[in-house]
Amino acid sequence: QYYRGHFLSSEAAGWAIHQREGLRLRFIRHTTALAQSIENEDSQTAIQCYQCLLEIDSLIEEAYQGLIRCYQAQGRQAEARACYEKCVTIFASTSGSSPSSATTDLIKS
């Protein structure tokens, strides 16, 4: 576990907020790239990366997509479906939106 929480989470100063968000976005970007690059060779580690991303931000749609792809590649269709349903629920309750057609198409395949 490389992400141990938000940088200076109790600090409300503007500089800290800016730095905290920059570090969070950098971690998300690099972890997403890592997970995508290893999906085919080490899907279990990719799953762990995607799950970590969703712990940080439950609205990272690329993480749901990656999880669905990995679960499907492992023949874990029920888990892929559950992941999609969680995505639908989280998006609806948090932002009043739906997953993109790219995510929906993954579960239909």
Image (cartoon, helix red, strand yellow):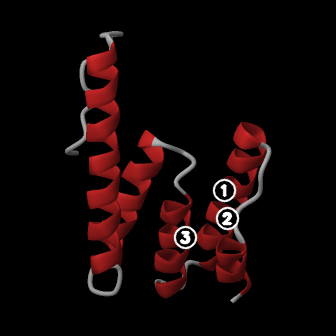
Q: Name which of mark 3 and mark 1 comes first in the sequence.
A: 3
Residue visible at 62% across and 79% down in the picture = 77
Query: Pointer 1: what residue?
Result: 87
Mark linked to residue 65: 3
Name the residue type under label 1: Cys
**In this view, which residue lies farthest toward the left?**
2
Residue in the foreground of this view, choosing between 103 and 51: 103
Q: As drawn, is 106 to the left or to the right of 25?
A: right
- CB within 8 Å, label 3 to label 1: no
Q: Measure the alpha-carbon separation of dots 1 and 2.
A: 5 Å
- For residue 41, which quarter of the picture? bottom left
| Residue 24 location (% of width, % of height) | 32, 40
- Is disc 1 placed on a helix, strand or loop? helix
The crowd level at tag 1 (other Cα within 10 Å; few <14, some 14-19, many 20+) is many
Mark linked to residue 97: none
- Is disc 2 placed on a helix, strand or loop? helix
Residue visible at 55% across and 82% down in the picture = 72
Name the residue type under label 2: Tyr
Q: Measure the alpha-carbon separation of dots 3 and 1.
A: 9 Å
- Is disc 3 placed on a helix, strand or loop? helix
Residue visible at 66% across and 56% down in the picture = 87
The crowd level at tag 2 (other Cα within 10 Å; few <14, some 14-19, many 20+) is many
| Residue 36 location (% of width, % of height) | 35, 75
Residue in the foreground of this view, choosing between 77 and 24: 24
Name the residue type under label 3: Gln
85 above or below 71? above
The crowd level at tag 3 (other Cα within 10 Å; few <14, some 14-19, many 20+) is many
Residue in the foreground of this view, choosing between 66 and 29: 29
36 above or below 86? below
Any part of residue 7 in sight: yes
